[in-house]
Amino acid sequence: QSVLTQPPSASGTPGRRVTISCSGSSSNIGSNTVKWYQQLPRAAPKLLIYSNDQRPSGVPDRFSGSKSGTSASLAISGLQSEDGADFYCATWDDRLDGVIFGGGTKLTVL
Amino acid sequence: QVQLQESGPGLVKPSETLSLICTVSGGSISRKFWSWIRQPPGQGLEWIGYVYDSGSTKYNPSLKSRITISVDTSQNQVSLTLKSVTAADTAVYYCARDSFCGGDCFDSWGQGTQVTVSS
């Protein structure tokens, strides 16, 4: 059971917009910045978003992040078939004194 | 462009010690945070801990009593030692770099190395 709660699955059709939520608490999302990672099949994770809403260079602006209170969201617009992957949110937890990950959301592009 | 490559034994016996090395090329190991993260089969990601180039460390409390992470700046390597392994330690182990978040984000990853704990 992850400290950060994500829906296990999400889906969308090409060209549409999909959002993935990440729910935490005051000791993690509520007081630290959120990161999002994309893990394609049989590959290492890749950083998509850091500091809640910042994209590393090379990440398309179709990917956007937001945070409000103790929850965060990742939005993917203009969905493409190659976006099918597992997505993980992550942040620091002050109570546990370490990095925590959400359980992951499997995105299917229909 | 920095590259990270994990190496180590693919198979470890229960109760033994696992040792992994992450070799960094194409960039300096200095003034960066270096983490180990693992992923059990079919499951999500678990942060193991990090080391900064000065040698300061932070570990996952659930693993703290069994792990040591260290850095060798002369060899551009980061190492992980995990003692008293059990089947629950079977996972893909990733080495990852944090170059701009202060220890809790991972902007470059190795390809991962599979570790199986079995007799």
Image (cartoon, coloured by chain):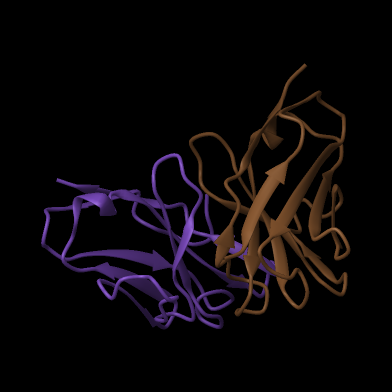
Chain colours: A purple, B brown
Relative to A76, residue B8 above or below: above
Res A89 quadrant in image: bottom left
Q: Is A95 in front, or is A12? A: A12
Most foreground residue, A8 or A18? A18
Q: Quadrant of the C terminus of chain B?
A: top right
- To which quarter of the image does residue B1 belong? bottom right
Q: Is residue A90 left or right of residue A96?
A: left
Could you tell me which residue is drawn at 49 percent across and 54 percent down? A45
Count how many numbered circles sit on residues in the image.
0
Report the residue at 34% width, 71% height from top: A73
Give the residue displayed 26% in from the left and 51% down from the top: A82
Query: Going by the image, does B38 lie left or right of B84?
Result: left
Outermost top residue: B119
Q: Could you say where residue A83 lies in the image, as x and y percent from the top left? A: 27, 54
Name the residue rendered at 72%, 74% in the picture.
B32
Q: Percent x, y for residue A87?
A: 39, 56
Q: Is residue A108 left or right of residue B2?
A: left
| Residue A106, visible in the rendered structure | no
Residue B6 against residue B114 in the figure, above or below: below
Expressed as whole percent of the image width and height from the top left, the position of residue A30 reads 51, 81
Visible residue check, residue A51: yes
As rendered, which of B116 and B2 lies closer to the eye? B2
Q: Position of residue B85 (x, y in %)?
A: 80, 34
